[in-house]
Image (cartoon, helix red, strand yellow):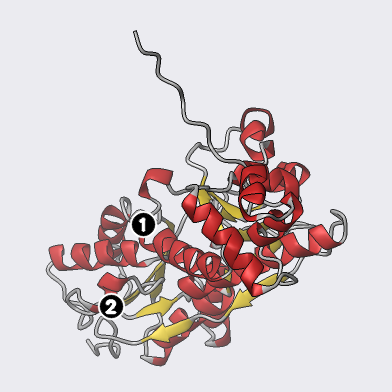
Amino acid sequence: MKTQTRLQKPTIKDIANACGVSTATVSYVLNGKSVLRADTRERVYQAMRDMNYHPNALARGLHTKTMRALGIMLGTVDPSEFVVNPYTSRILQGVVQEARRQKFHVTLFTDDWLGADASGPSIRDGRTDGILVVAPILGTDIMDTLPEMQPNIVAISAPARPFVDIVDVDDFAGGRLATEHLINLGHRRIAYLTGNSDLSSYQPRLAGYLAALDVAGIEPDNRLIVESHFDGSLAGAQTKALLELPERPTAIFAGNDAIAFQTVSAIRDAGLSVPEDVSVVGYDDMPAASVVTPKLTTINQPLVEIGVTATTMLIERIAASESSGGLRRKAENVLLAPKLVVRDSTGPLARR
């Protein structure tokens, strides 16, 4: 019986012998060193092509102390929905765009965060040079323990921590913009269906809403402030209850566009019209906001820009950590400006 022999993968030493250079020279070529002559680089590349050589990323990472890979960990969004969720998908677009430009790979951590002990091994295994944390839930230990496992951390929509860079939209300004728009249209009974109270966006958006009321001399009515959920599942019933108040709201500020869509539907189910009877403002400026009927007035979050900015900051942090021998630097917080996008779902207060 003829025995089969396993083909051996070529090594750096094989490449070096094939083109008459040292293994150090081959390493320089693989790592993009520009100190070599062009003809030497081409000889090495040609030998690699001829021998079907592909560098081992893990081995290179052990040698260079970097994998050129970024990890992404999620907060409230199921990892399986990351690419279809309107919020996270646009952040991911910005992350991939910038990572690709700077020649980094992106790794998505698909396991839920189960605490430092349970989730620590996958963080410490060295597969990534730094991690982006997207919208962690308040109260979880991820923001307190993760930096101890991986010093290169940038978080998106998260509470501030001493050594973690934060990138987010200015949610206080966003909440104020939405409410001021409705006030300027003559509305004074303005309800607010909030997002999740366990996310860092909750408090500043609420504060922006209350600040706008205060400047306009409008006394807040606690019956008009309703804690909802970003998936929109509670908004229909909550809107119905608001419309059944003895003095119903004439406008509703929704915590995000998903809530706003359900709010508009519930208003119609009650036999009322948007914006003739009730004006509605959303938050996020999802792609669907410009095609629904009526087209949704909303607050635009620059989500792609947030992803790009966070990725840039993380790669800069990785480079700084390498050059300083792992010393931590002070955290930087970046807030990007939201924009009011006026469409058809808001209008002047109807005189009744």
* Res 83 quadrant in image: bottom left
The residue drawn where x is 12% and y is 68% is 271
Return the x and y of residue 313 as percentages of the image width and height.
67, 68
How far apart in space, not on screen, are marks 1 and 2 (Cα)?
Answer: 18 Å
| Residue in front for this viewpoint, 152 or 165 | 152
Residue of label 2: 296
Q: Amino acid at mark 2?
A: Leu
Q: How many marks?
A: 2
Residue of label 1: 85
| Residue in front for this viewpoint, 205 or 72 | 72
In terms of secondary structure, where does tag 1 sit?
loop
Q: Is residue 271 left or right of residue 297?
A: left
In terms of secondary structure, where does tag 2 sit?
loop
Return the x and y of residue 63 as percentages of the image width and height.
74, 46
Residue 65 can be seen, yes or no: no
Return the x and y of residue 215 as percentages of the image width and height.
57, 86
Tag 2 or tag 1, which sits nearer the N-term? 1
Q: Quadrant of the N terminus?
A: top left
Q: Is residue 208 left or right of residue 256?
A: right
| Residue in front for this viewpoint, 40 or 298 | 40
Vertical arrangement, residue 212 with respect to residue 245, above or below:
below
The residue drawn where x is 76% and y is 53% is 24
Vertical arrangement, residue 188 with respect to residue 81, above or below:
below
Q: Residues within 10 Å of mark 1 (few under 14, many from 20)?
A: some
Q: Residues within 10 Å of mark 2 (few under 14, many from 20)?
A: many
Q: Amino acid at mark 1?
A: Asn
